[in-house]
């Protein structure tokens, strides 16, 4: 039986499974996958939304769990791909020179960058803006060689991050050499995406404030699409990832824009 002749009920079950696996699906992708019109796919998504299985959003759908879906906490993220993140941190930290001003995003991978920066005893007069409590604490050991500026804002306990109100004010005023951004997904078409809306808004400001944008993402993030877009690939200068990233996906990403560094 071809996808074009899959019964509506079975097709909707398959769509729901895809949404659960990917967190977000697009109408256009489902249309191509099932060989059906976008009108039919939208109708399927509407039926699934009415039954409570998913939530309709612009251009597609996200999962709606009986208990609201929560992002992984910082502590949970810290244990996932830990060696890979440390390697990514070292490669990213090697991109920084004395006298530079940088932005360091929130997250377990950017915290690895902070640790690697502290170990670089050759670095002096580095100014670091961050909205992450954990990266700031990691960097404290490098003061006074580093000047660490925390953005301020409302504390999100899950990631120990600072968001609006107030967090955007400083990012709208600064001009830095490099922004190091974490994310939940890097996709050849959908670009860089994140699961959390308040943090995604700040990440966009970080991209705008920097002359160079470096995205750091372990291999599990490559090819993923999360809920909120941070940036298109043409806004990313460098992607630093790990050895678990699929080589074919990295080749496609590099073809579309950023240079790719695989940390080992």
Image: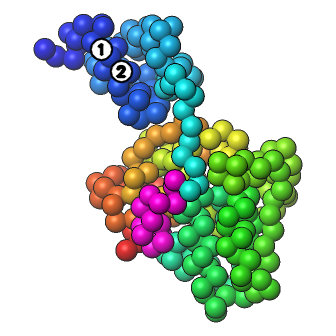
Question: Which residue is located at x 41 percent, y 10 percent?
Answer: 44
Q: Quadrant of the N terminus?
A: top left
Q: CA distance from mark 1 to mark 2?
A: 6 Å
Q: Are marks 1 and 2 in contact (CB under 8 Å)?
A: yes
Q: Is residue 251 visible?
A: no
| In the depicted structure, whether residue 25 falls above or below residue 85 | above
Question: Which residue is located at x 42 percent, y 44 percent?
Answer: 224
Q: Residue 68 at what x, y percent from top left?
A: 57, 28
Question: Which of the 4 image quadrants contains residue 104?
Answer: bottom right
Q: Residue 108 at what x, y percent from top left?
A: 56, 61
Secondary element type, mark 1: helix
Question: Would you say 16 lies left or right of 200 here?
Answer: left
Question: Which residue is located at x 74 percent, y 58 percent?
Answer: 131
Name of the residue lying farthest toward the left: 1
- For mark 2, does the 10 Å Cα neighbourhood hold few (<14), some (14 to 19), or many (20 or more) residues? many
Q: How many marks?
A: 2
Question: Which of the 4 image quadrants contains residue 99?
Answer: bottom right
The residue under label 2 is: 15
Type of secondary structure dominating the magenta stretch = helix
Q: Residue 251 at what x, y percent from top left?
A: 33, 57
Secondary element type, mark 2: helix
Write the start and end of the magenta stretch as one range.
76-88
Q: Which mark is residue 11?
A: 1
């Amino acid at each position: 039986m071809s996808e074009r002749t899959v019964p509506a009920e079975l097709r909707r079950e398959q769509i729901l499974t895809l949404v659960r696996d990917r967190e977000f699906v697009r109408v256009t992708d489902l249309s191509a996958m099932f060989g059906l019109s976008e009108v039919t796919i939208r109708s399927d998504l509407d039926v699934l939304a009415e039954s409570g299985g998913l939530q309709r959003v612009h251009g597609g759908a996200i999962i709606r769990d009986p208990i609201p879906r929560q992002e992984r906490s910082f502590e949970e993220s810290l244990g996932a791909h830990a060696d890979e993140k440390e390697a990514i941190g070292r490669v990213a930290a090697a991109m920084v020179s004395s006298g530079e001003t940088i932005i360091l995003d929130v997250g377990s991978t950017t915290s690895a960058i902070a640790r690697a920066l502290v170990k670089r005893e050759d670095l002096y007069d580095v100014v670091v803006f961050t909205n992450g409590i954990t990266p700031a604490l990691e960097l404290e050991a490098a003061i006074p060689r580093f000047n660490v500026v925390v953005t301020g804002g409302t504390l999100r306990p899950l990631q120990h991050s600072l968001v609006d109100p107030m967090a955007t004010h400083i990012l709208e005023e600064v001009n830095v050499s490099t922004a190091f951004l974490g994310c939940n997904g890097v996709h050849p078409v959908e670009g860089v995406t994140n699961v959390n809306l308040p943090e995604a808004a700040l990440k966009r400001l970080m991209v705008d404030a920097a002359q160079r944008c470096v995205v750091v993402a372990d291999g599990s993030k490559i090819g993923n699409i999360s809920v909120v877009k941070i940036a298109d690939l043409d806004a990313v200068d460098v992607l630093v990832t790990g050895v678990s990233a699929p080589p074919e996906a990295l080749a496609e990403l590099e073809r579309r824009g950023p240079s790719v560094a695989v940390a080992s």
